[in-house]
Structure formats: C-alpha cells, structure tokens
Image (tube, coloured by chain):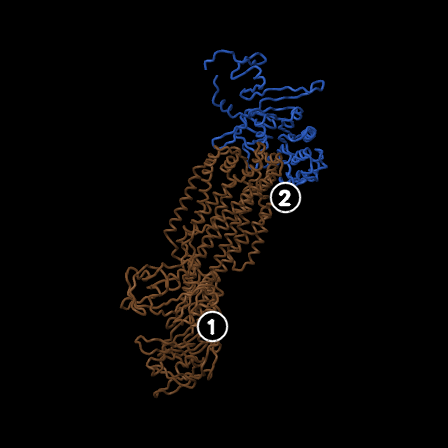
Amino acid sequence: MRIPRLARVHLGPMAVLFVLALTACVLVAGLPRVTQGAFDQALRRALTGAPAVQADLAVTVESRSSQEDLHERAQFDTRDRLWHKLLPATLRPLVAPGGHMSAKTTLTPVTGSHGGRYLNLGWLSDADRRVDWVQGRVPGAPATMRYEGEPIPLIEVGVVAEAAAKMGLRPGRTVVLGENDQVAVKIVGLFEAKDPGDRYWSHNTDILHYTEIQPPNGGDMEVHTTTLMSDAGLTALSGAGRNLTYRWILPVNGAAASAQDTVGLGAAVADFGRLVTLQSTGTPYHLETGLPKLLGDFLAALATAQTVMYLVLGGLLAVVLGVIVLAVRLLTDRMDHALTVARARGGSLRQVAGTAAALTGLAVAPAALAGYALSYLVPGPVVPIVHLGPVLVVVASAGFAAARPAVTHRTPLHERRDDVVATRPSARRVTLEVLVVVLALGGAYLLRARGPAASAGQDPFLLVVPVTLTLAAAVITLRCYPYPLRLLVRLTARGRAAVPFLGLTRAARARSGSVLPVLILLPALAVSVFAAVISDGIAGTQRLASWEQAGAPIRITSPMEIPAAQVERVRGAAGVDRVLLAQTGRVQLGYGAERAEALAVDVGQWRELLGDAPVGLPPLSDGVLVSPELRGRGTLEIGWQSRLRLATRGVIDSVPGFYTQGKFLVVPLSVQARPYVNTLLVSGDASPAALRRLVPQATVVSQAETLAAIQDDPLTSTVRWTLLVVTVALAGYALVAIVLALVVGAAERARAVSFLRTLGLSERQAQRLTVLEILPMIIITALAGLGLGLLLPAALGPGVDLSSYAGGLPVGDYALDLLTPSVLAAGLAAVAVLGAYTHTAIGRRRALGAVLRLGDLS
Amino acid sequence: MNPTLSELEARATRHKAAFGGDAHIVCDNLVRIYKTEGVEVVALQGLDLLIDKGELVAIVGASGSGKSTLLNVLSGLDVPTAGVARVAGLDLLSMSARDRLRYRRSVVGFIWQQTARNLLPYLSAAENVELPMKLAGKKRERRAAELLDLLGVGYCANRKAAEMSGGEQQRVAIAVALANSPQLILADEPTGELDSETSEQVFEALRRANRELGVTAVIVTHDPLVSEQVDRTVGIRDGRTSSETLRREDAEGQIIAEEYAVLDRVGRLQLPRDFMSALHLERRVRLELETDHIGVWPAREEPSSD
C-alpha cells in the first residue's frame, strides 16, 4: 500500500496525530515522575527532618553481669557486622554506612551527692571524630585506686565543657561513682562537639549536654551528664552493679528513601527486629526505632495525594486516549477511500487493517518515543506508568486504527443502509446503562457513608467511584440529550425561521459520530473542573490556615510587657498602617484551680483590622466570648489583674492566631484598668524583619510568611502544580476534541449544507446552521461535565483527606467558585462557534458542484 | 402404476439438471433485502439472470431498479439475502470470508462510475494496476505495461489520476480491473461521467478486453451508445429482470435488435409498461392459449362484484 506515500498524502492528520501523541506521552510519562519525585522529596524531608534517634535503627542490649560485658572494640565490631548482615534486602539500601556504637550507663550517681548529681560512664566508637578536646587531654587507659580500703577501677574520662561548668568538674579531679560497687573516674579533659548541629548528637545528647530533672519529691534539681572514655576504658566498664546499655546505631539515609518502597519498609523493620532478638544469648537484643511510625504518618498523607493524583492523571490519560482515537478516526476517515479500493481490489482484512495501523503507528510511535525521551528531562524517579503510558498510547491508537477499518470492511458488507435511521436501543443496552448508573450512584453513596479508608495505602474503591460516576454521566448525557433538543425542535417547527429548526433537527438526529466527542469532553471538563475545585479548595484552606495561625497581617507576641516606647516605634515603622494593643494571659476562672487562656483586645477594631480575611470573630463590646468548653456558664468570674464579672456574649471555636482548643476566652481590652500589653496586632505591609529589630524580645508572625511556609511544602506545591497543569492540558484537549469533531464531520456537513444552499440557503444562514448543529452537543456536554466536576469533590469529599496539604486544616468546604469552570465552559463554547464559522467560511470557497459530487459517493 | 419405494429413493437422489446449467453467471430468484429495525428495503426481489462465458452484456434500468445491488452481489462486495448467485461455479451465498477474498482477487474485477473512485490519486497509473497484483501477492513483471498498452493508455503509465482525462482514468481503471486476469469484469456505468467521444473509447477498451482476453463483461449503463452496441441488453425493473434485447447481424450486415420479455421459472412475465398503458391493462388480463402463442386481452368491462 506504499505507506510512506500514503503518509505524505495524509500529512495533515498525521501531523495532528504526531503532536497529540507527543504531548500526551510527555504528560503521561512526565507528570507521574514529577509527582513521584515530590512524594520522594516529602518522604526524605519527613525522614531527615525527624530526629536521628527516631529515624535511625538502634540495636540495644543491656549488660546485666560481667559475663555479658563487652570489653573490646572488636566485640562491638563483630556484632555490628552481624546486624548489617541481618538487614533485610529492602532495608539495606536505606541504611547508610558509618553507624556508630556506644556503651553508656544511666543513673550513675556521684557517691555522696544523695542522688543530686549523676555522672554516667560513656563510650562512643567514633568519639575521636566527633569531639574536640578543648582542655586537658584525651582519656587514656584505666587504672585502679583504693577506696575505703577496696581496690576500685579508676577510669580516665572527659566531660563536655558545658556540664563541667555546671557541675563544677575540672580536669584532674577524681570522682567516685556509685552507692555500692563503686568506680572512680578521673576527669582528664574537657571536650566540645565538633559539629553540635549534626543529627548524630540526637543519639548522644546526654554526652553533649547536661540535663536537669525535677525529682518527683520536689527537692533540688537533679543534674545528669555522661562522660566520655577511651577504648581502653571499656575494659574497666562492667554491667555488674550498673545500668549499662550497649547500642549499635544503623543510621537511616533519608536521602536514599523512595516513596515507592515505603509500603514494604514497615514489615522489613519488624522482620529485622525479630532477627535481632533471635541473636540473643543472654539479655535479649532489642531494636529501637521510630521509623515505622514515621513511615506510617507519611503513608497516610501520601495515600490521599496519590488518590487525587491517580484520579486526575487517570482522567488525563482517558481524555488523551480519547482525543488520539478521535484523531485516528479522522485519519482512517481520510484514508477510507484508499482502503475501500484496496479491499475491493482483493485486499485481505489483514492488509487493510494493517495499512491503517501501520500509518497510524508511523505517526504515533516516533511521537511516543520522543515524548518518552522528553519525559526523562523531567526530574523524578521512574515509575511503571512512565514506560506503560507511551506504550498504551501507541497500542490504543494502532489498535483502534486497525479495528475501525476491520469492522467497516468486514464481509458481508452493510446489512443496514446508512440512509435509514432507526434509534431504538436494544433492551440489553438499556439494562446495561441502567446498571452503570445505579452502580455509580450506589458507589458514591457508600463512599460518602464510609468516609476515608481505615488502612493506609491505596483505596481502590475511591478510585472506582469517580470512574463509574463519569461513565454514568456520559451514559445519561448521550441517552438524554436529544430529548430537550426535540422539544426545542418542536417549538422551532412552529416558528417561521427555517435555520433554527434545521440546525436543531440535525443536532438531535446526530448519530454515533457524536458519541466520541461527548466521551472526551465530559471527562475532560469534569476532571479539569474537579482539579480546579480541589486546587481552589486547597488554596483557600491554606489561606484560612495561615490566618488561623497568624490572626492578623502581623502579630507580635512578647513574653513580657511591650513598653509604650516600643509600641510607638512600631507605629512609626515604615509600612505599618495600624497597631492594635492586646494582652494575653492565663486567668483564673471563679475562685478554684480552673484556669483558662484569655485574650483582651478591642474586638471591633480587630475585626476592622482583619478586613476581608477568611477568619473573624463576632462583635463584642462588653462581656466575654468563650470557647465551646466554657459554653453555658452565663456570667463568668475571672481573676486576671482584678476580679471581673463578665456575661457570656457568644461561643467561638477558635481565636485566630491564639487559641484553637481547650478553655479560652476573649474580653474587651477596656476591662483592664491598666492593660499589660504583651501582644500587638499590626496591619500594613511592614517588613517582619524590621519589626523584629524594633521589638527584639518578641516573636513576630506574619500571615504572608505563614502562608509561604505552608505552600513551600514540596508535596503541597506539587499537588497544586500538577492539578494546574492537568486542568490546562484537559482544557486544551477538550478544545482539540471539538475541533477534531468538527473536522471529522466536515465532509458530511458540507454536503448537507450544499444541498440546502441549492435550495436557497444563504451563506450567513449556513454558518448559523452549522453553529446551531454543533452547539447543543457542546453546551449540554459542557454543562454535564461542569456539574460532574463540581459534584465529584462533594461526592468524594468525606473519602479524601487533604488536610496535610493545607496546614493541617481539613479541606472540606469546597467553595462553589464558578469562575474557573465558567471560563472553561465559555472558552469551549466560543471556540466551537469560532470553529463552526471558520469551517463554513472555508467551505464557502469550494464550488457547490464539487462538494455535491464529492459527497455523492454511494 | 404407483412407484415403488426404491424408485422414489432413486428419483430423490438423482441430480436434477441445475438451473442455468453451466452458464458463467447464474442468478436464480435472487433476493436482497436491506434491513433496519422496522424498515425493510427490498432491492432485488427474485431476479433471474444467465450469462455465458465470454459474453458482453449490458444491464439497463431506471434508478433504484436494483442494478447496482446486482453488481455489488456479483462482485462479492455484498451478500444476497436469498436465492442462488453463482459465478464461475462459485456459490456467492455460501462463500467463506477466505473464499470471498480469493474470488475478488482472481475471479472478478470491476470499474465504478466515478473516475476518482477507481484509482488511488497518489499512485501512478502503472502503480494502480500493480496494486491488485501486490495485494494478491503475485506480481508479474510487465503485466501492467502490457495491459495499459492493450487499452491504449500506455503513455499514461507514469501519470497520476489528476494528470489524466476522465476517459484515460476509466481506461486505466479497466486495466486495474484486469490486473489479476479475472474471468469476469463488472462495470457500473463506466461512461456515466464522460462525453460521447470519450465514452466510445472506454467502451472500445471494454470490448477489446472482452474479445482479446475472453473476459465475460457485465456493464450497467444508461448510455445508449453502450447498450445498443452489445449482443445482449438485460432490462431490470423493480428488482427483477424484465426484458432482454438480442442483437444479431442479418444477411446484409444490418444489426437487428429484438426485444423479449423475460419468463421466469415459475412462469411470471413482466409486460412492458407502454404495452400495458396502450391497452389499459390493469389488475386482470385475459389469456388465451393458441397453437403457437398466448394472447393477452384486457379484462372485459363488467360490473365487478369484489
């Protein structure tokens, strides 16, 4: 069939197909990489952000007798190698090399301190790399000394400089430890951490710092610290008579973590724990780690993001495939003549279908390959869909290209004649359609009733429901859209104008040709509206969360009173519009021990300050606003600077910027005889940094900074960014679908219009006719898609928890912001009208006879 | 005397001579109904047709009489609903998809009315002729050039459809139809879009194919230029063969055309419409059998009781 020459003849549709497949493959292969990359980044942030002691794996064992003591570094090393060997394969890439080992005692009292000072004995395997000796020398080998007539070990140790100062220890001093089985330590040096900020020290804060603990009996504060000994000191360190714990730290390399593998990690950690325990010979070995909890928390946040992403990307894939199939249809329509001739001249079904598939493949395969290659420019890990997406695009388009001519040119030929229209659906089809609708509605109801899935991980039900809902909406649209049209047709039939009647009649009689555009437009609009609504919902909730956290454009809180002079300086600072004084405090309720958080502020002015922010308080001129916990108490007796008796004027769920839970109340600032101003609420665009300089003792929180911090999260920004890209892409594909649908039906429409023009239809009327014919399908589908897109978040809302993307607030109140959807729908309608006009304008150039001859094939 | 059981059995198993005998094309009581829910269009309603090997036959009839449907059936593009359709001994009703493909590849070739529809516009004339050979997987060198030369369009071998006149295109289309040496070529109004001079050339090409290659040719036509030059013209009316015109040369070399009505196997006869209107024949006629003919008279004027 000379494929290359056929390709040259059909260059237009081939180019359209190439571009569509290219963009589709870039999107389908690229977006999952971006989202997966964001998931990974979020996981890494979760792992590296957590304290090392929580994220790392620590194998611990207590030595309870001298038999269980480890006296040499080699003994530690042997076990360290064993732990690394025991690591399950899934954990191994996550564990970074370069762990450390430690031996530390706890609660080792200084003899004679009566439990007031504790000097624990400690050894770190990599102390030489971690500390600098700032005074004295490095500890050496232990010796013995006599204490109360008994020889006791004397271990040389160093102490962190901070603790030495606190506990009055200096090099050269010998301290006897223990109430019995005493051991002496000789302080030979003081050290400081080389890098105190290193996550490493999270495992050994007791060595780096001293700790003060309030004893339960309420006496003086206990001071604890841990000394550092040399390797040689280990020989004198025994678990007999002391709480001695050995630790092997296997550090988790958060940067190597991948969200794809998290599901198996929890089980692997549990496995490792079991294996470690099995190695016990005396006192059992334990695995201590907070990794499973970290992963669990992350997976819970991830599951929602994945569900939304899968929904949106799945919708995109479906729409993309639909548009490509539409373009393939255009191509097969164009080459139908060649295929018909070939079939009639003895081409087998395989030859005919093969030609169509090969021609399609010629356009799609290089595009898919290029798109696949381009997707590697997108940062992010490779997930299976990256490979599968382009393959799916090629297989679907070539498959459709092969199937369509195969069905058309199957023998025997047409059992039906195209000129006889009958649209009575079979009972089987009606039953199937009713089933789909019932299943979809039932599924949505059950999902709402059930709420979010109890277990972390993917929720297949949540994914299936929107798909069936979309299918149901498509079925209903396809089945029902002729009815309102026919009503209109009946109305226009009475009128005198012929064009509305003809146009609407043609629209109402549109056959299966209009199914595909509906199936594309509907999910395209639904998913893009869904994405827009979700995105708006997240954005709105983020803003709400930032206001909830800040309470004002800028909030300045100080632990002590802010002097009037400073307040004046703040007032005078550049960009400050208004400064509102407030006082916070912990107040007594009644005369008992009950306390509540209180805020004294001029609520009326604060409301003005907040302006159109999404948070606010009810007006309050006198009396008190209380939290739900203080509801129903009538007049409150409050002990603040003076005794106040205030009537409850309202109940509030939170005080933005201050309190969200517990017992709290808001009173007017005027109730204080002399307000002790420790809080300023500032409006205007002043720089928070400048204000920090003006009030150095205070904390300055700005709403803009809070919002930026919420939005800065990689997961949040990626989710929103992906939603935006998908919305734009789907809107684009919807437009392409309309244009393609116009072009596909062009020949047939041109013939019909030409016939009518021979009957006296003017050009202007022809244009109106085309528009009227196209518009109902677009408007009705657009409305259905719009409705579905607005309905989906409401239907899925209880099942999807997006709070982790919105500063912890649940994203529930999806505002019906009709702007984006309306713009989408209006854009579609405008392009449709434009397309129809252009189409007729081009058709006008063709001679009437040529069009009629061209169409008059059968 | 009543036949015995064994005689009846023998009679039942004895092969009857099939209708049409060994004719090249046999259509017996051919019916084609297009069905759509609730609506049936009967395109052929019991058509009988016999065409011998090597004949050149024209089929004429009004628009919608079923000519094109008949041609589609004979070309293997369409399957009749009932009846018998046999071409070169192959039963067109019981053919499998594979048989049908082989039939289209080696038994039949055809030409459509629209010149543009016969040829692929992006291939040259020679390549168009080679296409059926390639599809059948049996390309013969020089065959395309020979065919184009035979039909007088050898000079068009390297031209594309747009570079040829309508007549040239149709003659190339005949070459395409003949590419795989079919036994039968079917032409649906091959001269429908051409002026009379060009029509003459195209018809001449068809006649040459018929005479020189021994191909049976069936031409559906409105063109008197064609229908009056063939040996036999078959008229179709309302999905049935209604008349046949035979032409022969008399002793002086004059062509004599004789029109016959067609009598089907059960004795039905279609009277020509102008005969019926001339004698006001309606609903009922009176027949009288004479020794060498049957007389047809209008029904007597009498008060009807029904």
Q: Amino acid at mark 1?
A: Asp
- Say whether residue A88 is visible: no
Residue A817 vs residue A15: left or right? left
| Towards the viewer: B190 or A2 | B190
- Counting from the top left corner in percent of width and height, residue A99 is at 47, 72
The letter of the brown chain is A
Q: Which residue in the rendered view is the most extreme toward the left?
A: A591
- Say whether residue B39 is visible: yes
Q: Colour of chain B?
A: blue
Q: Is residue A293 above or below residue B275?
A: below
Q: Which residue is mark 2?
A: A9
The secondary element bearing badge 2 is classed as helix
* Quarter of the rendering occupied by the C terminus of chain B: top left
Quarter of the image holding residue A698? bottom left
Quarter of the image holding residue A227? bottom left
Q: Is residue B136 above or below residue A111?
A: above
Q: Residue at x 54, y 51 (%)?
A: A24
- Counting from the top left corner in percent of width and height, residue A275 is at 41, 67
Q: Which residue is mark 1?
A: A198
Please tell me how many numbered marks the rendered image carries: 2
Q: Is residue B203 above or below residue A600?
A: above
Marks 2/1: CA distance? 68 Å
Q: Amino acid at mark 2?
A: Val
Residue A592 vs residue A743: left or right? left
Return the mark for residue A441.
none
Q: Residue at x 67, y 21 (%)?
A: B248
Ranked by sequence position, the earlier of labels 2 and 1 is 2
CB of mark 2 within 8 Å of CB of mark 1? no
Q: Is residue B184 above or below residue A559?
A: above
Q: How would you rate the neighbour count of disc 1 (Cα within 10 Å): few for under 14, some for 14-19, many for 20 or more?
A: few
